[in-house]
Amino acid sequence: MKNILRLILAFLLPFAAFNTIFAQSITSQVSTNFFVEAYNIRGRPFTNKDALNVEGTPLLNNEWKKGTVYFKDGSVSKDVELKFNLEKNELYFNRNGEMFIFNDPITSFRLETESEGKSGELLFRSGYPANGRHNKESFYEIVADGAKFQVINFRFCYLADAYVYGGTSKKKFTPNEELYIVDVAFGKITRIKRAEASVVEAMPDLKNKISQICSTKRLKMKTNADLIILFNELNNL
């Protein structure tokens, strides 16, 4: 019996040693800020096993888009192919055609976009005060940046029932947003609507200035462009 055990151990030890070396090599590669674990197996649906029963997508961008990722330790990864999941508020990247999730904490990322033939870039950032179901790791799109005030947008989507008259019941990913003003000096975050009155309510001390800028620049506060103009002015006061 002992001889048999010795033979089994002699046979298995080389494989154990190989696996240990292989695991160590993977670990050493992971220490670059790239990854450890696959988020999903290739081809596996995100939420519903019956993908035919779900309309839309939880992804901000269905196709891989180039971007730059900034990590908490100060390192940067450029020209990475990225996808952002609005339902889970998670960032993925492409490795040999498979989707992976980053292991190291991310402070912000830039994502290339294209609309109507024009290229652009979106900036997402974490580290804002905890707010309801959002924590300091939650990513917000930066609408208007500044040293005094910022406008940030928590973009998300959720599965909702989508009934079709005379058809079968389905579920659909529905996009939504939550817009906030950040008072940088006081670390205060206040939710607003896309309306001048809502901005004034969040910043009553600047009521006259806000009204003056909106009137002079003919701002309706319905678009990101209007918010950027207003807060560029407020940050320069």
Image (cartoon, rainbow, N blue to C red):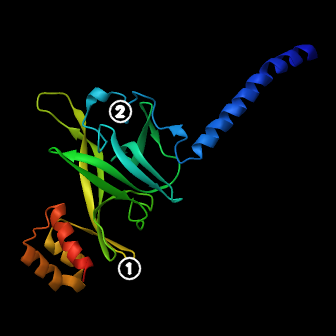
Disc 1 or disc 2, which is closer to the eye? Answer: 1
The x and y percentages for residue 154 are: 31, 58
Q: Nearer the viewer, residue 51 or 127?
A: 127
Which one is in front, 111 or 43? 111
Q: Who is closer to the viewer here, 208 or 156? A: 208
Q: Is residue 234 left or right of residue 166?
A: right
Identify the residue at horizontal 45%, vertical 31% (top origin): 96
Picture quadrant where residue 8 is located: top right
Mark 1 lies on a secondary structure that is loop
Amino acid at circle 2: Asn
- Taking 8 as reference, is 141 above or below it? below
The mark found on residue 48 in the picture is: 2
Residue 185, numbered label: 1
- SS class of the residue under badge 2? loop
Is residue 181 visible in this depiction of the protein?
Answer: no
- State the residue at coordinates (53%, 42%): 35
At x 38%, y 56%, the residue is: 139
Q: Locate the C terminus by quadrant.
A: bottom left
